[in-house]
Amino acid sequence: MSNKIVLTGIQPTGMPHFGNYIAALKPAITASQTQKTFMFIADLHALNSVHDPKTIREHTYQAATLLIALGLNLENAILFRQSDIDEIYQLNSLLMNITPKGLMNRAHSYKAAMDKNIANGDDIDAGINMGLYTYPILMTADILLYNSDIVPVGADQKQHVEFARDIAGYFNKTYGETFKLPTPVIGHETGLIPGLDGRKMSKSYDNTIPLMAPEKELKKKIMRIITDSKTPEESKDPDTSTIFQLYKHFASESEISEFAEMFRRGGMGYGTAKNILFEKVNSVLSGPRAEYERLMANPAEIDAILKHGADRARPIASETLARVKRKMLG
Ligand code: TRP
């Protein structure tokens, strides 16, 4: 176990699909088996787009419960709700004063929102609030509050972590050595996770498999995977098959090579292959699914776990904030 401080934030965006699981949740859960981590549900980050408190609360429970049900190691991972630590907004406000506006202008997420407005012929600032504009500062506060060294993120978040590094650098230059410079680590190349139609799995293509789909729905979705029209006898290429590409994230090394061999050998129809995929996925997910349902019906238990996490995180946050205030205010 390295003594580097690792931190990950997970946005509460509703039920993740297989693609999210493979790219983000699974690596975080695997890492928690051997690595101490700060892991929080970033409910404050959701505020710039979700204005219904009930939705935010529910999605926060959902994200936390999923992580727990899928086997997050709660000894190693300090799991908490971002908004349970008041220090976060104080550090966020203080960092505003050393963050160049120009840096925020360059944020991909903000630029994408402006580009959309331009394309639609709307006012350039339409629908853009200051929460969206300053999103990278809040993320910087998350990272610096817990003295993080390593921040595992998806490729889309890399720029935000680089901003955190820049802002930490500006702070150190202005007030003297205060923050470590965090490093983004882009998750394992999980490759493209194909959806039911073979395109990238994405809500916007309506081709996803929800992670906690009940058994019947899971089977129905898997049976809908689009394949080519090879006959059962023909040899098939596992590397271009959605069935195989999904299977390999749930099976063991030996099962994966055996399944690949069955594709290449011929004699296995796609219907059979889909059944094998379903059985595998269902056997991996049926335990977590039951635990997910049990915990979601017991919000007091989730609250207790999140409170315990916040109690572990808070002393570190208040130490950092005190240090920053001393540096800035004397
Ligand atoms: N912005 C991240 C995302 O959308 C979530 C997040 C918030 C985060 N704060 C963070 C990730 C701090 C890493 C570190 O996925």
Image (cartoon, rainbow, N blue to C red):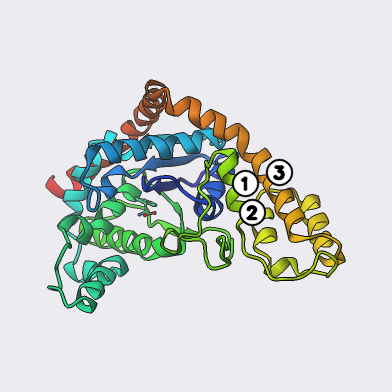
Q: Are marks 2 and 1 in contact (CB under 8 Å)?
A: yes
Q: Give me the residue at 17% from left, 62% from top.
A: 127
How far from the left and from the top, in percent, is residue 293? 49, 29
Count residues near mark 1 (Cα–Cα under 10 Å), then give few for <14, some for 14-19, many for 20+. some
For disc 2, the marked residue is 223
Q: CA distance from mark 3 to mark 2?
A: 12 Å
Camera-side residue of 264 and 26: 264
Q: Is residue 95 left or right of residue 182?
A: left
Q: Give me the residue at 28% from left, 49% from top.
A: 45
- Front position among marks 3 and 2: 2
Q: Give me the residue at 23% from left, 66% from top.
A: 104
- Front position among marks 1 and 3: 1
Q: Secondary structure at mark 1?
A: helix
Amino acid type assigned to the residue bearing label 1 in the image:
Lys
- Residue 104 badge: none
For disc 1, the marked residue is 219
Q: CA distance from mark 2 to mark 1?
A: 6 Å
How far from the left and from the top, in percent, is residue 199? 54, 68
